[in-house]
Image (spheres, rainbow, N blue to C red):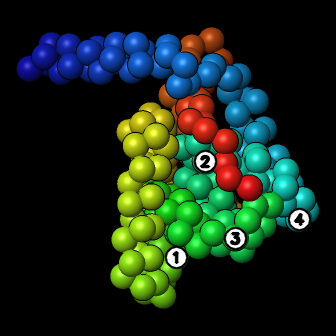
């Protein structure tokens, strides 16, 4: 049984390695990935929405759930992009794939405010986004975090798969976002 489990694990690693070599992923130094996330948040907090939109879009494509939720909010509010309720909902619903309470409750509130037609369009768009930027497509590993040093889980941290040698494999955006 132990050997069978090792063969299954080795097969999964080999399958991901083969997948990660194609043009859908880029190797990025691990510290550069962390800096990208930090800078996206800092720039958003400074209300430089055009740059924040670009940076959060890049991190959202990589599969970062917090960036996906922020990008959804930016679409909903028209920050750095044209206001688009359906696309905003779709990104937030994708972030809720991780089942973090803040993301799932926001997705539910948006669903409750939508017409059945809007909800259907948003769900279809979210399903399309999941194919390219969901957890399975990005090989992202996410966990709940305590961002304030207490025992309360109040954030989500996501880590891309290792690319070896201090690098991570980051999912590329399929196409440019509409502005």
- The x and y percentages for residue 166 are 65, 18
**Marks 2 & 4, CB-CB < 8 Å contact:** no
Q: Nearer the viewer, mark 3 or mark 1?
A: 3
Whichever of callouts 4 and 1 sits on the residue coming sooner in the sequence is 4
When asked about the image quadrant of residue 53, the answer is bottom right
Q: Residues within 10 Å of mark 2 (few under 14, many from 20)?
A: many
Q: Which residue is mark 1?
A: 106
Residue found 39% across the figure and 65% down from its top: 123
Q: Which residue is mark 3?
A: 83
Q: Residues within 10 Å of mark 3 (few under 14, many from 20)?
A: some
Q: Which residue is mark 4?
A: 47
> The C terminus is located in which quarter?
bottom right
Q: Which residue is mark 2?
A: 60
> The N terminus is located in which quarter?
top left
- The x and y percentages for residue 7 are 20, 13
Whichever of callouts 2 and 4 sits on the residue coming sooner in the sequence is 4
When asked about the image quadrant of residue 30, the answer is top right
Identify the element where label 2 is drawn: helix
Front-most of residues 129 and 143: 129
**Marks 3 & 4, CB-CB < 8 Å contact:** no
Whichever of callouts 2 and 1 sits on the residue coming sooner in the sequence is 2
Front-most of residues 161 and 82: 82
Q: CA distance from mark 2 to mark 1?
A: 17 Å
Q: CA distance from mark 4 to mark 1?
A: 22 Å
**Marks 2 & 3, CB-CB < 8 Å contact:** no
- The x and y percentages for residue 149 are 67, 60
Left or right: residue 98 compared with residue 35? left
């Amino acid at each position: 049984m132990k050997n069978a489990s090792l063969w299954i694990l080795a097969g999964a690693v080999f399958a991901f390695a083969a997948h990660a070599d194609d043009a859908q992923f880029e190797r990025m130094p691990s510290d550069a990935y962390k800096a990208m996330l930090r800078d996206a948040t800092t720039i958003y907090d400074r209300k430089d929405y055009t740059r924040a939109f670009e940076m959060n879009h890049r991190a959202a494509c990589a599969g970062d759930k917090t960036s996906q939720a922020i990008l959804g909010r930016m679409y909903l509010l028209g920050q750095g992009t044209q206001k688009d309720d359906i696309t905003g909902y779709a990104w937030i619903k994708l972030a809720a794939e991780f089942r973090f309470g803040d993301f799932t409750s926001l997705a539910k509130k948006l669903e409750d405010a939508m017409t059945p037609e809007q909800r259907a369009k948003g769900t279809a768009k979210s399903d399309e986004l999941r194919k390219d930027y969901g957890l399975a497509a990005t090989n992202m590993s996410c966990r709940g975090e305590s961002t304030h040093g207490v025992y309360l889980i109040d954030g989500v941290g996501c880590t891309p798969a290792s690319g070896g040698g201090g690098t991570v494999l980051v999912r590329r955006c399929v196409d440019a976002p509409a502005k």
